[in-house]
Amino acid sequence: MKHLEEQMKQGIAYIEEKLEAFMPAQEQLPPVIFEAMRYSLFAGGKRLRPMMLLAACEAVGGKKEDGVPFACAVEMIHTYSLIHDDLPAMDNDDYRRGKRTNHKVFGEDMAILAGDGLLHYAMEVMAEACYANPNKKTTGAMQAIAHGAGIHGMLIGQVADVFYEGKPLTADTLEFIHIHKTAAMIRAALKAGALLGGATEETAEKFALAGEKIGVAFQIVDDILDVTSTMEELGKPIHSDEKNEKITYVTLYGIEKSKEIANTLSNEAIAIWEEFGEKGNFLKNLTQYLTKRTY
Amino acid sequence: MKHLEEQMKQGIAYIEEKLEAFMPAQEQLPPVIFEAMRYSLFAGGKRLRPMMLLAACEAVGGKKEDGVPFACAVEMIHTYSLIHDDLPAMDNDDYRRGKRTNHKVFGEDMAILAGDGLLHYAMEVMAEACYANPNKKTTGAMQAIAHGAGIHGMLIGQVADVFYEGKPLTADTLEFIHIHKTAAMIRAALKAGALLGGATEETAEKFALAGEKIGVAFQIVDDILDVTSTMEELGKPIHSDEKNEKITYVTLYGIEKSKEIANTLSNEAIAIWEEFGEKGNFLKNLTQYLTKRTY
């Protein structure tokens, strides 16, 4: 995995350079909103979604450059969702990735607007890319991302998460939340990347399906690690689900069965990448890395 | 103006029918978010922005139907902005258009998500329309709307409004707020409509300019009516700006000078519509109606 980690590091650097180039200068009045947007956008994320989008584009024979505006948009949307999720009216979190949350630094009003601003700007960046090259690739990628982020995707997952908090949760509902809140944007990123790289609708749908499996597996592994890991290994507080009386795959199925489910999903995704031979290698290794973390 | 009011009534009915058709059914779980989105979207707005978009499309010889997804998107974006503006962390308003604000009915968390959801869905509806017909008209319209709504348009106006609250305000800053918070979306709607109707970039820019003038004039007239009108005439509390110690065109320039500025802007917009002869009539009458209200 040494090689993969090196590739991921390079990927992160590439994406951050592009994000930096896209973000407007802070000249405009009042500059506070640009500070607030940048604060969260450059808070050190893993850049998994944009990395997958670019990898999907290359895996089907496309040029990475063609994916850049959409990759940046996906990361802006992801960041906006974190800012709004952390708000006092939502999860009311004071810290994220070891830094104070956006509203703790800039106030609740500016945090709401910074989130809105990132979503707006993601839309603008994608619209510009579509206008520069109006075709089925660009508009199809934008549609996939808009759909994956919106009221039939990530957003409805967050709504369900908020709505069912403290209520009894069935396995179906928990799966619904994971598929939407976590997996929908991974799915959308991979589908958009494939479309931008010139894939057929059929191939793009394969990427989408792999994305959904990776997203759900990733979330289940997160639930498992919360129980089995030490704080040192995980780099964040453990047993947080138990403390919050949160229903997870582990509380519903137990650790062994949860591992089995995650493993099956992960293998199904990997089988899809193997169809692309050499070109699918990075996505295969990344899937392995994300869904088979130590537990 | 009898004829215009009849046309506006028909326009509102047409737009509400289309919005209704676009909004997803409430089957999906959890339905609360769809209720919350619909509550504000169908709270009886004047539908000015979508009406202008469709009128612009027709004024340059286009078909109204081609503007529909974009007109609906513009109204969704407008509605989202009202929901977020009303939030406790922002203006903290309990009522809008005589109805309880979204967060008063659905809670702050769902109101934030309902606003987000409308912005997401606007993006999705536009992306779908672009994917169905990927060309410079559709993608240009989407770009105009994304730009007008975003961090160089409406959003930055709201940021400035929040940021300068209770601070001394220069005429330049006040103009900046009006141009962005109010005028940018009117500008974008008219430009998008013209592009969708097949206008050249040059003609579309004329529509954009007229939109900016209408937007600022409309806002100045609002400031004037707050001082000179009676509550019966206005249908909402008067002297609210004075009570909130809000700096407006009236406090900066006085009533007579404010009327003069609004009148000049309105006449400049009307001169643009007159270039389009018969076809510009509806927009001309609408401009007159909006910017020369009784005072």
Image (tube, coloured by chain):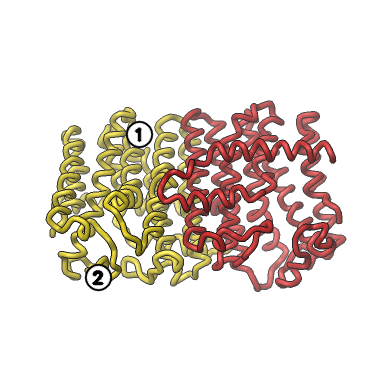
Chain colours: A yellow, B red
- Residues B270 and A219: in front is A219
Drawn side of residue B260 relative to residue A206, left or right: right
Residue B140 is situated, as x and y percent measured from the top left of the image, at 55, 36
Using the rendered image of the protein, determine whether residue A4 is visible from the camera's viewpoint: no
User: What's the residue at 20%, 36% (across, down)?
Assistant: A272
Q: Number of callouts in the render?
A: 2
Determine the CA span between mark 2 and mark 1.
39 Å
Q: Quadrant of residue B9?
A: top right
Q: What residue is shown with label 1?
A: A195
Q: What residue is shown with label 2?
A: A237
Using the rendered image of the protein, determine whether residue B156 is visible from the camera's viewpoint: yes
Viewer-side label of 2, 1: 2
Residue B136 is situated, as x and y percent measured from the top left of the image, at 54, 31
User: What's the residue at 65%, 58% (across, down)?
Assistant: B99
Q: Secondary structure at mark 1?
A: helix
The 10 Å Cα crowd at callout 1, few under 14, some 14 to 19, many 20 or more, is many
